[in-house]
Amino acid sequence: MDIADQVKTIEEGLRRLDVKLIAVSKTKPAEEILEAYHAGQRAFGENVVQELLGKYEILPKDIDWHLIGHLQSNKVKYIAPFITLIHSVDSLKLLKEIDKQAKKHNRVIDCLLQVHIATEDTKFGLDHVEVIELLRSAEFMELTHVRIRGLMGIATNTPNQKEVKEEFRELKALFDGIKASFFKDEASFDTLSMGMSADYNIAIEQGSTMVRLGSTIFGGR
Ligand SMILES: *Cc1c(COP(=O)(O)O)cnc(C)c1O
């Protein structure tokens, strides 16, 4: 199946479940992104700032760009003018820099806190306690130009579906707990970004509202 057919089929299925599709286009050329774009896809995810900037320059301006990979504070200024959602906020320091750069551009930037749910220690992210400490901190409460929309997590890369399911289940429980404690009256705390090509069905079953799919749409990397 080609990229256009694939993106249409997947998006249709996800829309019925009220799950948003982020097409992960990292390492893929602009022509392939355009194939998905012409099939109606507007939300694309990249994990490297330099690559994202190159694509932002040459591709249609109504694309919603999502930063899904680890972000260094010194790179925030480059994406602050246009980024739609940063999925990978893993420190208060980074969040403060996003706030500062957003202010310069008169924007409020939507962010997700990345939670470490995998057993591998190579993956970035906050643990449960750190998420809560961040949200409770006085410094966080002073930020005016970032909006926390929810949480993001990457499950362990394993064929053990039970393990993956358990990790997503825990993230959903944390999401619900945080919503109840910190964002009770804010409808904008509505995004649980979990699920990639290998595990998005399990993620959706566990309550994901946003999946990040690369190889399922564009083929292997
Ligand atoms: C690459 C990547 C994806 C997409 O991975 P696929 O297995 O190709 O679907 C999703 N999320 C993050 C954070 C990624 O880095």
Image (tube, grey):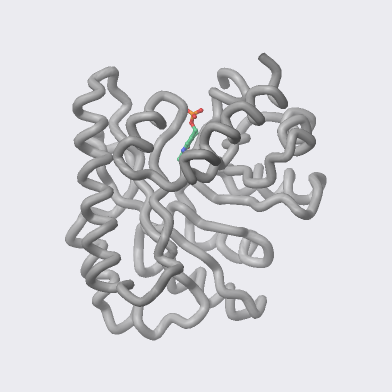
Q: Where residue 195 sits in the image (x, y, percent)?
A: 40, 36
Image: 159 above or below 214: above
Left or right of 218, for residue 130: left
Residue at screen point 74% across, 28% down: 32
Q: Where residue 60 sits in the image (x, y, percent)?
A: 81, 48
Image: 121 above or below 175: above
Q: Where residue 187 sits in the image (x, y, percent)?
A: 42, 69
Left or right of 69, for residue 45: right
Front position in the image: 160 or 5 = 5
Q: Where residue 57 sits in the image (x, y, percent)?
A: 79, 50
Residue at screen point 61% across, 26% down: 9
Total marks shown come to 0
Q: Residue furthest front?
A: 16
Residue 119 placement: quadrant: top left
Front position in the image: 94 or 151 = 151
Image: 81 above or below 176: below
Left or right of 38, for residue 135: left
Quadrant the C terminus occupies: top right
Residue at screen point 28% across, 55% down: 126
Front position in the image: 17 or 24 = 17
Image: 145 above or below 93: below
Residue at screen point 56% across, 62% down: 76
Front position in the image: 60 or 89 = 60
Left or right of 181, for residue 75: right
Quadrant the N terminus occupies: top right
